[in-house]
Image (cartoon, rainbow, N blue to C red):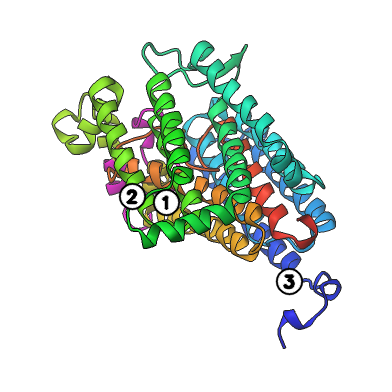
Amino acid sequence: MTTGAFPLSHRRRLPFPVTTERVLLGVGALFVIVITLGLILTRGRFEPGDLLSPAVWLGCALTGHLLLERRLPNRDPLLFPIAMFLSGWGLVVVDRLAPPFADRQTLWLVVSVGGMLAAALTPHSLRWLRSYRYTLLVIGLGLLVSTILLGRNPSGQEGAPELWLGIGSLYFQPSEALKIILVAFLASYLGEQYPALRAEGLDGLQRRWAISPRILGPVLLMWGLSVVILIWQRDLGTAILFFVVFLVLLYIASGYTPILLGGAILIVLAGIVAYSLFDVVQLRVDIWLNPWNEGEGRAYQIVQSLLAFAAGGPFGQGIGQGAPEFIPVVHSDFVFAAVAEEWGLVGVFSVIGLVAVVVMRGMRIGISQRGRPFHTLLAVGLSTVIGVQSLLIMGGVLKLVPLTGVTLPFLSYGGSSLLTNFIIVGLLLRLSAPEGT
């Protein structure tokens, strides 16, 4: 007998989701404690502050679980434990690679879990995203313009992309918030246009390459926004991410296959223009094609990353035993290389598998929302954000694609990124629970 044979009220009392989440959080807690102790032993000294991050992590995990159990008993049981597992791993990695930033990342974890719970437990959060889409879009674009005009770079390096807004020592990257805002706006807009887009998409397939303005217009508009981000901020990763997510949503809404080919052509055209105009893009493409000739110069970062992967082997050097600190900005953009060196292929495949599970669970949530276009597109869009961003940075540090400068979700240092990804998890949890939609 399947669970579908039971009334909804009976299914809500089933203990499986709660039990699964508890077990997985317990595994995550054991993992965080063990690797923290391993790092302490490697350093050869113990300070009370070394236990701050795992203690805060345990508090966040317990608080989040208890509140979700009470308010969203039918939520997806895997999303929150995986997010906490990866973020706990990230705390220890940041403490290992850049100790001065560990306390700050720990504070951001508290804020991020709070943001996730607000997104998951607020009764009308999904309705607000749909109803106030234009207001949110204006706010998001306003933040983008503010970054173009007033942007700063926390590193202070001359010529580095200025993608942050700062007040004193506190910095925030508006493009991270814009990811959620744009996905919500597109899901709402395309959800309302779904019947017309679907009809025109199928009709377009019958007429082959006759593209309707209803479909072509949004594609060109989003492509233009991505080009603006690329030109003014030289943020190749965010520009590609925005455009790819939009293509996926438009394709799902319309079913019009040529959208994907046309979008790929537009991405290539934008890349060619960026390569000819911007030194930073040209540098990333050049060192992607052949880094070994400049291993001591411009390609030093990617060469050291590849050496870290080679040094890790199947099981890694062990926490604190490798030398990933030779990679510049390893705690942020290249944290995946640090995992590869000290945890080996086991760690690499673990990260890939956990991110893949998050993406697949999000897609599954979208499929379960059939007949509700906004909810389906929102779940798919948010999952695509995490998936594409992960692929861009993992492929970049492995020299499979040019470096784009995005962070690895949950693992990399960066408060804006951590907060955004936890809010995404919160929205997916809300979508996964019958009582949350």
Residue ID at (26%, 20%): 277
Residue ID at (65%, 54%): 375
Q: Amino acid at mark 3?
A: Phe
Q: Secondary structure at mark 2?
A: helix
The residue positioned farthest toward the bottom in the image shown: 1
The residue positioned farthest toward the left in the image shown: 293
Circle 1 Cα neighbour tier, 10 Å, few/some/many (<14 / 14–19 / ≥20): many
Q: CA distance from mark 1 to mark 3?
A: 32 Å
Q: Position of residue 402 (x, y in %)?
A: 29, 37
Q: Residue 317 magenta-drawn?
A: yes
Disc 2 and disc 1 in contact, CB within 8 angstroms: yes
Magenta residues (range):
306-329
Q: Amino acid at mark 2?
A: Gly
Residue 16 circle label: 3
Residue ID at (47%, 59%): 353
Q: Position of residue 266 (x, y in %)?
A: 32, 39
Which residue position is annotated with label 1? 343
Q: Secondary structure at mark 1?
A: helix
Circle 3 Cα neighbour tier, 10 Å, few/some/many (<14 / 14–19 / ≥20): some
Q: Earlier in the sequence, mark 3 or mark 2?
A: 3
Q: Is residue 188 above or below residue 298?
A: below
In the foreground, 26 or 211: 211
Nearer the observer: mark 1 or 3; the answer is: 3
